[in-house]
Image (cartoon, helix red, strand yellow):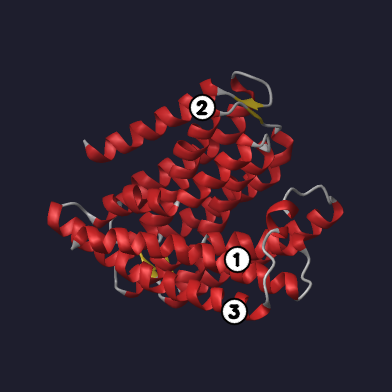
Amino acid sequence: MIALFLLGGFALLLVGGEFLVRGSVGIALKLRVSKVVIGLTLVAFATSAPELLVSVVAATRGKSDIALGNVIGSNIANIGLILGLTALVYKMKAVRMHYRNDWLFLLLANALLAVFLFYGGITTGQGLLLVALLVGYNIQKIRSARRNRNLAIGEEIEEIRLPVWKGVVLLIVGALGLSFGAKFFVSGISALAIHFGMTERFVAVTMVAFGTSVPELAASFMAARKGESDIAIGNIIGSNIFNILSVLGFTALVQPITLQDAALFTFDFHASVFFTLLIIPLMSLFTKDRLDRLEGALLLGFYLIFISSLVF
């Protein structure tokens, strides 16, 4: 039964997220919304929907450790596991100047989250501040994108052409899939933790975080395989920004998040900051403006050490 809840919930999250992306993009294209706006807002938000729904459902059930652990663990997995694996398989050109501003903004978001967690959690007002920063970040990215039209989002978005009614149907089905998937998934996580005597924090930071990071893994591998290193790396940094500002921000608006297990802040969050700090320096540590197999192995090694420290 536990496996059924976990696998069924995970499948619904993946399918629901895919339908939500296709439905929202299809409708936006019919309404002649700019592809720049679609790529930087609708697609980015929709691909973060699984993390958002899991965290919202967990928080409303009083399981803040799952809500927080999902985001913190996902941010660690995005850099250590996904970026590490991608660099290990595909040598990537990584010009630091392309990511510096977004990386600095991610550090700012982490610093803000550190203050909130130090005082015990995220209130509704603080959630509103995170969402406001998300809006400001998106506005800045859209303006920047319009100045620099060299965006590689057109090819993927062009494929999603469908009547408005089909877009609405996909949107509704996707939203329902995400809603039920999140509920089943959270129930499965709780049951799994109880059955094996594990803490919800451990399950959230490891298994849940990996599960909700699967879309980022697929996107980064696909981009790197096509030689689009900027997209692969930008996808990771952007996803981590969205996780903090969007997932935790909107979750706190629905239900304030309380820090229940101090280790989420004293260990897991600090590990997340450590991985974040590694991104830019690694691009010039061994090879100039590249992420090669050595850097990938280093990131992956640090991730395995982190997971091992949780297990042992």
Percent x, y for residue 264? 34, 51
Can you tell which mark lies on residue 98? none
Residue beneath the point at 35% across and 32% down: 304
Q: Which residue is mark 2?
A: 88
Give me the C-alpha separation between circle 2 and circle 1: 31 Å
Q: Nearer the viewer, residue 21 or 62?
A: 21
Left or right? Give the position of 230 relative to 77: right
Quadrant position of the N terminus in the picture:
bottom left
* On screen, residue 119 above or below 296: below
Residue 111, image x, y percentages: 53, 51
| Residue placed under numbered mark 3 in the picture | 168
Q: Place residue 129 in its image quadrant.
A: bottom right
Instruction: Name the spot of residue 136 as percent of width and height, x first.
Output: 69, 64
Closer mark to the observer between disc 3 and disc 2 = 3
Q: Residue at x 13, y 57 (%)?
A: 195
The amino acid type found where label 1 is placed reads Arg
For marks 3 and 2, the one nearer the N-term is 2
Q: Could you say which is closer to the camera, residue 234 or residue 128?
A: 234
Marks 1 and 3, the one that precedes in the sequence:
1
Residue sitting nearer the eye, 63 or 18: 18
Q: Residue furthest bottom?
A: 165
Where in the figure is residue 116, as x and y percent of width and height? 46, 60
Residue at which label 1 appears: 22
Q: Secondary structure at mark 2?
A: helix
Q: Is residue 183 above or below residue 82?
A: below
Distance in Å between CA atoms under marks 1 and 3: 10 Å
Identify the element where label 3 is drawn: helix
Instruction: Name the residue type under label 3.
Output: Val
- Residue type at mark 2: give it: Leu
Quadrant containing the C terminus is top left
Disc 1 crowd rating (10 Å Cα; few below 14, some 14-19, many 20+) is: many
Between disc 2 and disc 1, the foreground one is 1
